[in-house]
Image: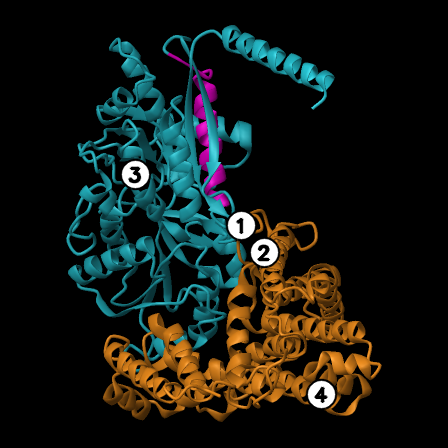
């Protein structure tokens, strides 16, 4: 390297250091960072984008500040999906969790969307402070509590190596969803049922729980079967199901799956073989409650029922309606009920930070923020008045059922377990 | 000369595989009395599964032709081939949308639209496949075998992402909607629509009263697959270019010495393989009524398996392998548990390759230098 070049480099290095110092000094007060880790590549984007919008909106309403302006709060939406998989990617989610663990300014991790992803990141963040995690969407029960026949023996302990809980969620869990869906089925007059699942933690979990709850409510479950989520079609499978109920079709088919797992093709082949969804009903869990199912399924999706955690937008309370109005003013019509959950997840994180300050604590201390999350009681959120229990589960297990009519989900009603 | 112990190893592995299959069998509901009972209760359904298997197998078979041709000539597993097929689906859907065929009920309009879409899809995927060869494989032709393989995997990702972007362009196809490129997209059931608007029943066996479904869609894919295979075989056997292809496949250096333009022959192979993938794309779209950026991955895997099963480099073998896989999958879905369908397909592949490493119709070819 020539002397002149070396001198130039030295000047640049010094200049950048001076500039960096100025930047740090000029901001005033420390920065707290909240990140979300949701799949934003692939079919789930329809839902996750509204969650991110809602989180953004909530932070803007707080003015991007916390503790009376002492702290600047910034929010970053991370993607835990990869183009190679087209849905959440275990490698990316693990990377996100490690990145969050290593960044001391991050005090809350809002995620994940998929329960399988949470199973990977909870233990990593548990050993990083612990860093509080609040999920707007995970419904697999084993992440927070044991449920007979649905969770493994070592769950949920296996996710919390330090023994301290650091994961809470505003979504109701699948062990409840199973009995919610069974209630919906009783409401629809269904007597015989065939269950399909996509063989993943979420899909099989919810299918198992529907199986249990439906049987308990006197519905005959003919069989539960896994399907190959990458197959070209399911005509042979549907042909078999069309004669599985003593030579005829069952009253209904339940599909435990997320929409990324070829669900549109399953609906299409079901309609091709067994006719429209009024004759043989087609029911799905929250993973199918999305416009992606309608656009992929076309006319075949007409008449499908699906449930999703949260209140029917028509049943929202005063705060919920206010949120909806604010959201629609900024982002346009709101059709995804997940947005309300995203909004309350961000609310919970901000409230925890405020509570730490109010108690005279330091909100950059992850353990203190985490403890404050679990201490949230009787919070007046967009969902209604709710609390987190000791497991981190929300105390308002509302589900809404939707029915596809005229190419969109129409709220069918709110159901409880 | 093979070492003598090799003679014992193959049957040993075969016995091990059979044992494993028997072990898993009861879990995978390989319950013969039960299967026999359901066939006896509803024998017509057996024919139904046969139809479904043949139609699905036909699509796999046509894609497999592209794999087997390329492998036969440059010994490259063209991983991007399945994704070229996916692009074929989107090209066809876009053409149909631009010609207004998706929204009309006029049977003549739809029929012309489908014909135009077939030509456009074939032309576009042929050009795409040849471009992939020119860009990603040609310069690596004399590199170690692994280099073009990795390059092919890379191209596969690139083409998949093109599909992901394409599926988000709702200004091209309004029905793509607002959910982004990741979601599955509707490919309307145009063949049935033609029949319905002419007042015919799309189910060709409806009047027989046997309760069988053999729709115009099933007929089209099976017939088209047969026509394409016979046409390709005649082309390879009888034309000048076909002979040049066979010569290149047998010995590239000798073919070159005899004055065959290797680059031209290889480009032609990619053009034909790509064109077939485009035709398969239109057929799959019309048959399964679905367009999805990820659909090329599994289709590619199954087609490659079909090509290996039938004997790689052998055109009739690729067709045979395709139909075999389609039938196996249909019967497994129909009589066993769908959870295990892939296991049956690949266990069959393992078994056949153990006893016939060259595939069902493959010939023993001398190892190339």
Q: Give the residue pinned by disc 4.
A: B231
Q: Give the residue pinned by disc 2.
A: B157
Residue A239 visible in this rendered orientation of the protein:
no
- State the residue in front, A98 or A295: A98
Instruction: Name the mark nearer the viewer: 1 or 2.
Output: 2
**Is B63 on the left or on the right of A400, as rendered?**
right
Q: Give the residue pinned by disc 1.
A: A83
Disc 4 with disc 1 on a shared chain: no
Using the numbered discs, state the Cα–Cα distance from disc 1 to disc 2 in whole angstroms. 8 Å
Instruction: Name the mark nearer the viewer: 2 or 4.
Output: 2
Image position, residue B335 (x, y; %): 34, 82
Name the disc covering residue A122, or none.
3
**Shade representing chain A:** cyan
Using the numbered discs, state the Cα–Cα distance from disc 3 to disc 1 in whole angstroms. 24 Å
Name which quarter of the figure residue A133 lies in. top left
- State the residue in front, B76 or B43: B76
Judging from the image, mark 1 belongs to the subunit labelled A
Q: Secondary structure at mark 3?
A: helix
């Amino acid at each position: 390297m020539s002397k002149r070049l070396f001198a130039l480099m030295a000047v640049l290095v010094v200049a950048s250091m001076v500039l960096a110092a100025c930047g740090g000094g000029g901001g005033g007060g420390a920065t707290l960072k909240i990140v979300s880790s949701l799949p934003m590549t692939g079919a789930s984007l329809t839902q996750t984008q509204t969650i991110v919008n809602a989180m953004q909106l909530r932070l803007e309403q707080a003015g991007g500040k916390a503790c009376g302006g002492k702290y600047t709060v910034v929010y970053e939406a991370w993607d835990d999906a990869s183009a190679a998989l087209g849905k959440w990617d275990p490698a990316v989610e693990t990377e996100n969790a490690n990145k969050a663990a290593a960044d001391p300014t991050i005090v809350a991790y809002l995620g994940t969307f998929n329960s399988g992803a949470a199973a990977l990141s909870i233990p990593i963040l548990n050993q990083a402070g612990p860093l509080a995690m609040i999920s707007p969407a995970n419904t697999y029960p084993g992440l927070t509590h044991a449920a007979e026949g649905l969770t493994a023996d070592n769950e949920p302990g296996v996710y919390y190596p330090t023994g301290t809980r650091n994961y809470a969620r505003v979504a109701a869990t699948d062990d409840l969803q199973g009995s919610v869906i069974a209630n919906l089925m009783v409401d629809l007059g269904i007597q015989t049922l065939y269950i399909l699942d996509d063989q993943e933690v979420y899909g099989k979990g919810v299918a198992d729980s529907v199986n249990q709850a439906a049987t308990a409510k006197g519905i005959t479950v003919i069989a539960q079967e896994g399907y190959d989520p990458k197959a070209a079609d399911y005509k042979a499978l549907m042909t078999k199901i069309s004669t599985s109920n003593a030579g005829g079709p069952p009253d209904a088919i339940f599909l435990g799956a997320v929409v990324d797992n070829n669900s549109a093709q399953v609906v299409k082949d079901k309609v091709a073989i067994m006719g429209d969804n009024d004759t043989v009903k087609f029911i799905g869990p929250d993973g199918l409650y999305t416009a992606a199912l309608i656009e992929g399924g076309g006319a075949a999706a007409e008449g499908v029922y699906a449930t999703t955690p949260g209140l029917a937008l028509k049943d929202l309370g005063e705060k919920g309606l206010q949120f909806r109005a604010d959201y629609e003013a900024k982002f346009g019509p709101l059709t995804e009920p997940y947005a309300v959950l995203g909004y309350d997840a961000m609310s919970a994180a901000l409230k925890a930070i405020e509570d730490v300050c109010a108690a005279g604590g330091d909100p950059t201390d992850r353990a203190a923020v985490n403890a404050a999350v679990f201490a949230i009681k009787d919070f007046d959120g967009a969902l209604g008045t709710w609390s987190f229990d000791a497991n981190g589960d929300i105390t308002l297990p509302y589900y809404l059922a939707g029915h596809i009519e005229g190419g969109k989900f129409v709220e069918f009603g709110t159901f409880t377990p | 000369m093979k070492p003598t112990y090799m003679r014992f190893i193959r049957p040993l592995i075969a016995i091990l595989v059979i044992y494993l299959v028997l072990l898993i069998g009861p879990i995978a509901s390989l319950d013969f009395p039960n299967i026999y009972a359901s066939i006896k209760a509803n024998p017509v359904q057996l024919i139904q599964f046969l139809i479904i298997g043949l139609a699905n197998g036909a699509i796999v078979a046509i894609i497999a032709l592209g794999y087997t041709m390329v492998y036969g000539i440059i010994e490259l597993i063209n991983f991007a081939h399945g994704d070229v097929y996916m692009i074929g689906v989107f090209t066809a859907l876009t053409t149909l949308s631009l010609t207004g065929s998706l929204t009309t009920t006029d049977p003549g309009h739809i029929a012309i639209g489908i014909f135009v879409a077939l030509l456009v899809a074939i032309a576009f995927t042929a050009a795409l496949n040849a471009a992939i060869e020119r860009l990603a494989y040609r310069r690596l032709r004399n590199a170690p075998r692994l280099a073009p393989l990795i390059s092919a995997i890379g191209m596969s990702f690139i083409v998949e992402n093109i599909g992901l972007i394409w599926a988000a362009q709702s200004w091209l196809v309004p029905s793509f909607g607002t959910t982004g490129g990741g979601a599955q997209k509707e490919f309307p059931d145009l063949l049935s629509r033609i029949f319905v608007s002419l007042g015919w029943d799309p189910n060709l066996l409806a009047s027989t009263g046997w309760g069988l479904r053999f729709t115009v869609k099933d007929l089209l894919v099976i017939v088209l697959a047969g026509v394409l295979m016979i046409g390709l075989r005649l082309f390879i056997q009888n034309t000048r270019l076909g002979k040049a292809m066979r010569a290149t496949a047998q010995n590239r250096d000798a073919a070159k010495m005899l004055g065959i333009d290797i680059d031209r022959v290889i480009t032609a192979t990619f053009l034909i393989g790509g064109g077939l993938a485009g035709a398969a794309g239109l057929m799959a779209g019309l048959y399964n009524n679905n367009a999805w950026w990820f659909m090329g991955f599994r289709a590619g895997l199954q087609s490659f398996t079909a090509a290996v099963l039938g004997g790689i480099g052998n055109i009739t073998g690729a067709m045979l392998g395709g139909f075999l896989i389609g039938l196996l999958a249909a019967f497994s879905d129909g009589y066993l548990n769908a959870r295990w369908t892939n296991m049956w397909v690949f266990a069959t592949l393992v078994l056949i390759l153990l006893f016939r490493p060259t595939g069902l119709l493959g010939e023993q070819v001398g190892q190339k230098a």
